[in-house]
Image (cartoon, grey):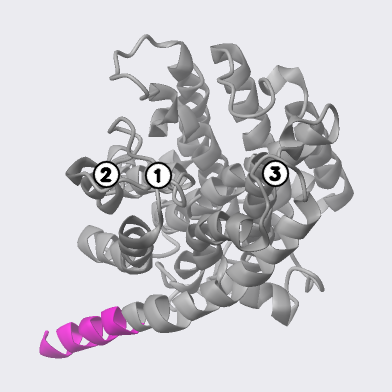
């Protein structure tokens, strides 16, 4: 959620070496590769995920007023999905306007696999081997190692229930080249049709929860990619706007206070019954879609000022501590429920019995160094190995 994912901000999928800023239309926002403020935003999204899970497992998510607020921090998943949509779609949006070149499909898929799988497989292996009550059937192993939990019944296990969102995100990774191929003809002057098309497809995806798709018991089709496509589309639309001439979206993004107000209103509405009941009670189809719409609005409003009108340094989002947390955000996401599962017995706390602040502080304090270790020992070495392999391949070529 996840995309939650640091490497996408590090990799420059397209080049502007042959296109100077002076050669671009004056209304075009200058193109950038790594955007530090997005890294900082990723850090806050990861911390929001911890908040909502701790709130549920300590029972405060069922309190009358604050419970709805703490529980609705799960909308940070929308932020992760929109970040992935923006960062991974931006090369294709730029290529459609002659501003750069997207990665070849195989290289793109390799980079995604190397970014996601090594650290994730470490978590899966350790959880299934050593965490009690996780089950050890071949179905659980296959579903979790292949990130197909949302398609296989009863395979989300303790310590890894959050991985449903990573399963959805990987589905998006795999289908993104297909989306790019289907829009291949919308280039040059025809690129102006890309934004309306994405908007229409995102709007059509809001019907998904109402479609009677037959599924096995305990599997819900609204947890598949079509159910959350609007969140990815929010980022994809931002990618299209970021490579085009000035529009209403750029003017809106320049009004940071208004964008913040829109995000706050969207979050506040999501904390009402409009977006479903409290806790893990399944919402009605219309409530689910209201939540999706509000999440897309929130993500668009929070990210637009950073990618369409960002002309100054953000002291908080670009603070060294925040940037470090952003680098470790994927590790925070995949490890924090393992840490949370261990906090309760270590501190003698009964789940759903309160102690929200204590459990939140301990879980966060322990998740960060574990995530930092995961980054240093698994994630970064895997990326370096991929870069070395690519350099060797280019040398042979």
Highlighted magenta segment, given as a residue range: 384-397
Q: Would you call the spot at circle 2 few (<14 residues within 10 Å), some (14-19), or many (20 or more)?
A: many
Q: In the rendered image, which quarter is residue 38 located in?
A: bottom right
Name the residue nearer the viewer: 385 or 223. 223
User: Is 183 located above or below residue 226 in the figure?
Assistant: below
Q: Would residue 187 be seen by someone viewing this image from the given angle?
A: no
Mark positioned earlier in the residue sequence (3 or 1): 3
The answer for how far apart the CA atoms under marks 2 and 1 are is 8 Å
Left of 17 or right of it: where is 31? right
- Residue 377 rendering spot, x and y as whole percentages: 41, 83
Q: Would you call the spot at circle 1 few (<14 residues within 10 Å), some (14-19), or many (20 or more)?
A: some
Q: In the rendered image, which quarter is residue 360 located in?
A: bottom right
Numbered label tally: 3
- Residue 156 rendering spot, x and y as whole percentages: 38, 41
Mark 2 touches mark 1? (CB < 8 Å): yes
Identify the element where label 1 is drawn.
loop
Q: Which residue is mark 2?
A: 140
Q: Which residue is mark 3?
A: 58
Q: Which residue is mark 1?
A: 157
107 inside magenta stretch = no
């Amino acid at each position: 959620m996840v995309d939650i994912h640091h490497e996408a901000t590090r990799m420059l999928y397209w080049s502007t070496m042959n296109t100077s800023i002076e050669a671009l239309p004056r209304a075009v926002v200058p193109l950038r590769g790594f955007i530090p403020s997005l890294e900082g935003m990723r850090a806050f999204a990861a911390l929001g995920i911890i908040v909502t899970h701790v709130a549920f497992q300590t029972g405060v998510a069922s309190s009358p007023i604050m419970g709805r607020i703490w529980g609705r921090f799960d909308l940070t998943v929308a932020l992760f999905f929109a970040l992935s949509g923006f960062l991974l779609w931006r090369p294709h949006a730029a290529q459609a306007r002659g501003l750069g070149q997207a990665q070849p499909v195989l290289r793109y898929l390799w980079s995604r696999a190397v970014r996601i799988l090594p650290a994730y497989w470490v978590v899966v292996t350790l959880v299934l081997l050593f965490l009690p009550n996780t089950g050890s059937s071949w179905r659980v192993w296959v579903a979790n190692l292949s990130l197909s939990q949302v398609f296989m019944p009863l395979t989300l296990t303790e310590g890894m229930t959050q991985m449903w969102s990573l399963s959805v995100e990987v589905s998006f990774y795999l289908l993104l080249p297909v989306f790019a191929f289907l829009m291949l003809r919308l280039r040059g002057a025809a690129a102006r049709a890309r934004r309306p098309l994405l908007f229409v497809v995102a709007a059509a995806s809001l019907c998904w929860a109402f479609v009677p798709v037959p599924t096995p018991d305990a599997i819900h089709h609204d947890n598949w990619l079509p159910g959350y496509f609007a969140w990815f589309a929010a980022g994809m639309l931002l990618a299209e706007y970021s490579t085009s001439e000035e529009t209403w979206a750029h003017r809106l993004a320049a009004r940071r206070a208004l964008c913040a107000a829109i995000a706050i209103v969207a979050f506040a509405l999501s904390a009402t019954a409009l977006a479903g009941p409290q806790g893990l009670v399944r919402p009605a189809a219309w409530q689910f879609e209201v939540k999706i719409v509000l999440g897309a609005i929130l993500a668009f409003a929070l990210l637009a000022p950073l990618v369409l009108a960002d002309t100054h340094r953000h002291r908080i989002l670009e603070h060294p501590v925040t940037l470090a947390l952003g680098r470790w955000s994927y590790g925070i996401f995949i490890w924090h429920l393992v840490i949370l599962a261990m906090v309760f017995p270590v501190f003698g706390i009964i789940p759903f019995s309160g102690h929200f602040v204590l459990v939140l502080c301990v879980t966060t304090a322990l998740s960060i160094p574990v995530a930092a270790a995961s980054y240093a020992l698994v994630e970064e070495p895997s990326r370096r190995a991929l870069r070395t392999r690519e350099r060797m391949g280019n040398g042979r070529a």
